[in-house]
Each structure stands twice: as structure tokens, then as C-alpha cells.
Image (cartoon, rainbow, N blue to C red):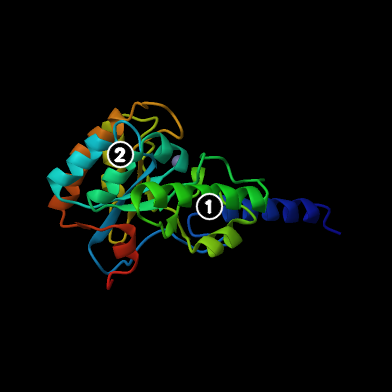
Amino acid sequence: MNTLAPLVAAGAASSFMAWAVRGRSAQIFGRSVWRGPRHLPALSLTFDDGPSETTPQILDLLSEYRVPATFFQCGHNVERLPEIAREVAVRGHEIGNHSYSHPYLFLRSPAAIEIELRRAQDSIQNHTGSAPVWFRAPFGARWFGLSAAQHKLRLTGVMWSAIGYDWSRRADEVVARMAASASNGAILCLHDGRELGLNPDVRTTVETVRRLVPILLDRGYKFETIGRLICPKI
Ligand SMILES: [Zn+2]
């Protein structure tokens, strides 16, 4: 008898669960995308955790470069800064749902998960006039109950093909990492806020946008919102 078998089985089960919760291609806890088509030279810039006091600086840069992006907003931040949340929509960017209070959904009850998504959906719709169709899980962590909540609210999950670590690394590192990760259909994840932080320091993100967008434009990439990246014919 193989006495290691139960341990091996337990290890396999735990790595399967780790993938199901955090894996970018996993759809165990809800329908989800993590990249667009590989045959078109298009990619998406996405920003999580906003709006923040610094979001307008990012909007100005995107206007200067004439590129759209997708902002996954937290309902709590939308209620704190409704004018800035609305400005994101007015400038033609897409708004996604990033939960109300940015909790780990891992180990939460299905009811609590649904409340987080629904409160954010209501806040975003009330203050920006835009009803999100995309949801990005806080920390990229999904759990039981998310699939049903997404289904009720008609949300599709969005992970990423590359994340910038713009909350902890220097701008030159973030720019290099993102530029190296750019490819057809890439979904690049940056942050215009820091969870629910007041007046967060997002200078690294601003500097990354300032330097990264021209590099990618020079390489011939077209910037799309998530909606147009995933469904190019719309
Ligand atoms: Zn986040």
C-alpha cells in the first residue's frame, strides 16, 4: 500500500483549490476571462481600487494619449468620490465592479459575497449612470457563491494576463514588466487606488501610465476597453 497516497491526494486537492481561487484561467467559481484574442494587435489597460483623488491625473494622461481603459471601481470609493467616478464614465472609459469594500471573498458566505457585488453595482450605477458587466475579484480571489452572484447581476469575471505590482515596486520596474508582458489580447492590471485608502500615493501608477502607453503605441498596439477587447465586433 502506498502510504503517501492520501498526502499526495491532499496536496493535489489543495493545489487544485489554490488554482480555482487564484488561477487566472480558472472558472470554477464563476465565468471569467483573462485575455482577449491573440490574432489582433489590441490590448487593455485596467485600473483597480479607484476612484481615488489621483484618478483625474490618470484620466488626463489617457486623454492626452487618446486611449481608453477600464476602471474596476470599489463601491465605497465611488460613494466617497462620486464626481471622480462619474468623470471616468464621462471620458468614455469602461467601468467594472471591484466589490463594495474590497474584502477577500475567500471563505465568505455566498450571501456576503452577493451583498458585496450588489452594493458596488448599485453605487456605480447610481453615481456614474453605467451598469458594469465586468467584475474583478479583490486580490483576484474567488470563492463559492461568486458564480451565483455574478449570474444574478449579469457580471463576467475579469482576471489579467499581467499585473504591475504598482503598489510596491518602482515605476521603471513596473514599466519594464508591463512592456515585456504586452502581447495581442493582453489585459494589464494597474491600480488608481489602494483598496479603500484615503488619498493614496499612486505616483508610481501615474508615472507608469506616462511612460508605458507611448511605448505600447509605438509598438503598434491598439488600446481597447475590456468590452471591445473581448468582443471586437461590438
Ligand atoms: Zn483591488
Q: Earlier in the sequence, mark 1 or mark 2?
A: 2
Q: Could you tell me the amino acid type at mark 1?
A: Arg
Assign a secondary structure to mark 1: helix
- Report whether 14 appears left or right of 88: right
- Determine the image quadrant of residue 211: top left
Crowd rating for badge 1 (residues with CA inside 10 Å; few <14, some 14–19, many 20+): many
What residue appears at the point 50 percent right and 46 percent down from the top-left corner? 99
Q: Do the residues labelled 1 and 2 touch (CB within 8 Å)?
A: no
What residue appears at the point 59 percent right and 53 percent down from the top-left corner? 114
What residue appears at the point 47 percent right and 52 percent down from the top-left corner? 121
Q: How far across and how far down the image is residue 21, in percent?
A: 58, 52
Which residue is labeled 1 in the image? 118
Residue 162 in sight in this render: yes
> What distance separates the C-alpha of mark 1 from that of mark 2?
21 Å
- Please give the label number shown on residue 84: 2
- Report whether 218 appears left or right of 160: left
118 or 94, which is in the foreground?
A: 118
Q: How far across and how far down the image is residue 82, in percent?
A: 35, 39
Image vertical order of residue 30 relative to residue 17, above or below = below
| Quadrant in which the N terminus is drawn | bottom right
Image vertical order of residue 102 relative to residue 36, above or below = above
Q: Could you tell me the amino acid type at mark 2?
A: Ile
Q: How far across and how far down the image is residue 154, in percent?
A: 49, 64
Image vertical order of residue 124 relative to residue 39, above or below = above
Find ligand 1 in the image and state its quadrant: top left
